[in-house]
Image (spheres, grey):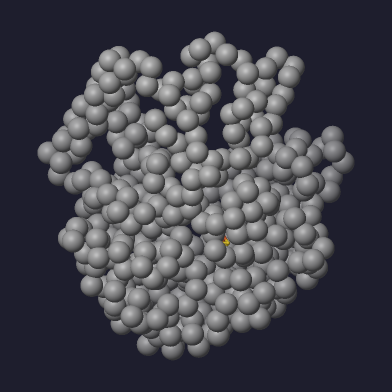
Amino acid sequence: MLLLMNKLEMGTTYYADIPNLTWRKGDEVGYNPLTYVPKDLDDIDVPGYRYTIRSVFKYKNFLDPLPYNGWLQYPNTALLTARGCTQNCLICGGSREAYEQNCRRHSLALRSPAKLISDIQFISRFSRAPIFILHDLRQGGREYVDEFFQRLKKLHLKNEIVFELFQYADEAYFKQIEESVPNYSVEITLETHDEKIREYNGKFSCTNAKVIETLNSALKHSCKKIDLFFMVGIPGQTPQSAVENIDFCETIHLACSKDPRIYYFVAPLAPFLDPASPAFEHPEIYGYKKLCHTLEDHRKAIAQPSWKHMLSYETKDMTRNDIVNSTYESAERLNDFKLTYGLIDHDSYEDIKWKIEKSKEYIREIDRILALPEAEQAKALAELRKEIEQLNSYSICGKNELKWEVQKNYANFYSLALVGLEQLYQDYVNKIKYLLRPKKRLQFTLDPEQGKGKL
Ligand code: SF4
């Protein structure tokens, strides 16, 4: 970006030597090869919370920089620990193979423990809500993990930290977390109870006994909440296997002494099969039938009136109908399971049950309308539109089940004000530096070997 700005500033329109740039000049379109692949994530903030806070104060615009609707009520934040992945899950567009083929990334780029801790410290100065550490920290190796937790411990953090697990974790790992931070939760996308499918797909490729051992170890070491996700539509899954995930929820629940800190979720792989994922790139190998190929196919699909018709794929074992039906059947069974073991109250149970019923009803109604002659479809869909909008906001889990508990949303007023003033001050310093040394940006060069920029 700096190289491009340099060119624009000098009035040069020769862009062919700027790595990674795709550009258009009149009718001319250029695509420069990906020759610059940064080796670590220390040069840029991802996400840029400092920039966001600075924007709030600088432009006195409070709402635009907010990351999502409702953030002020529930201001949780996330930090990206790595770009790329050591895993190669078949349905993931951010998998090892996808990064290799699309970004020429052959190894993981990590945010260093020192930078991550500085990010966490910065967030804790304006927010008291949970901080989600995206990706499994253990991708960085033993030393990386040890350094991260040693530094974290010294922070005496008040925020809860949420850790993601890609694979089995032993007791020592949770003990290390417990000793470093007073509040933590865990996220696991297990996807299926079927050990063979997990092995095939890549994530949590271990026995179910090991899965349960992982959960019990986390619970033993004061984990506040474990979110466990199952999925419908993964490679090798049949409708029966998808529904059987709920039996495994019960097995886990009983094997974990009915601990209510485990939250169970089920969701379809929807609406799209990740472009760039191994399953998208080689559907015939992994048992997928792609219904959308181009960007335009996906654009058309997302405009469909129900998620069933948005689905960009089927599998050799599941049609669109099977995916939809198994999803709702799993959701119903999950709801029953939660009520049986007192994991939700009766009102929530009834609420979710009603939403599932209503969703199924709309899916059937939309199917009926789409079978009408084309001229009649638009009118019938327009009549349903309001209800369809509601349908899209229906969820098949409880309203707050996905949220981590927050005692206090923000840091105190003085801390918030200080953070804002510091960022404004930094902005002025940058401006003055630029005025005094206007040529500095022009000296920017890239070192593709190191994947680093140099000023
Ligand atoms: S889904 Fe698999 S490949 Fe994708 S980011 Fe997670 S662990 Fe990595």
Q: Residue at x 30, y 35 (%)?
A: 53
Asked if residue 141 shows in the view, the reply is yes
Is 21 rendered above or below residue 226? above
In the shown orientation, is residue 404 left or right of residue 363?
left
Taking the view exactly as shown, the residue that stands out farthest to the right is: 373
Give residue 371's position: percent from left, percent from top: 84, 48
Q: Quadrant of ligand 1?
A: bottom right
Taking the view exactly as shown, the residue that stands out farthest to the top is: 11
Give residue 20's position: percent from left, percent from top: 60, 35
Instruction: Looking at the picture, tell me which residue is in the foreground, 372 or 258.
Output: 258
In the shown orientation, is residue 6 left or right of residue 219?
right
Quadrant showing the C terminus: top left
Q: Quadrant of residue 198?
A: bottom right
Asked if residue 70 shows in the view, the reply is no
Q: Residue at x 40, y 52 (%)?
A: 111
Give residue 226's position: percent from left, percent from top: 39, 71
Is 455 rendered above or below residue 172? above
Instruction: Looking at the picture, tell me which residue is in the foreground, 228 or 375.
Output: 228
Give residue 362's position: percent from left, percent from top: 66, 53
Q: Quadrant of residue 126?
A: top left
Instruction: Looking at the picture, tell me which residue is in the foreground, 337 or 245.
Output: 245
Count of all numbered marks drawn on residues in the image = 0
Q: Residue at x 42, y 60 (%)?
A: 402
Instruction: Looking at the picture, tell me which residue is in the foreground, 434 or 267.
Output: 434
Q: Residue at x 57, y 71 (%)?
A: 203
Q: Quadrant of residue 297?
A: top right
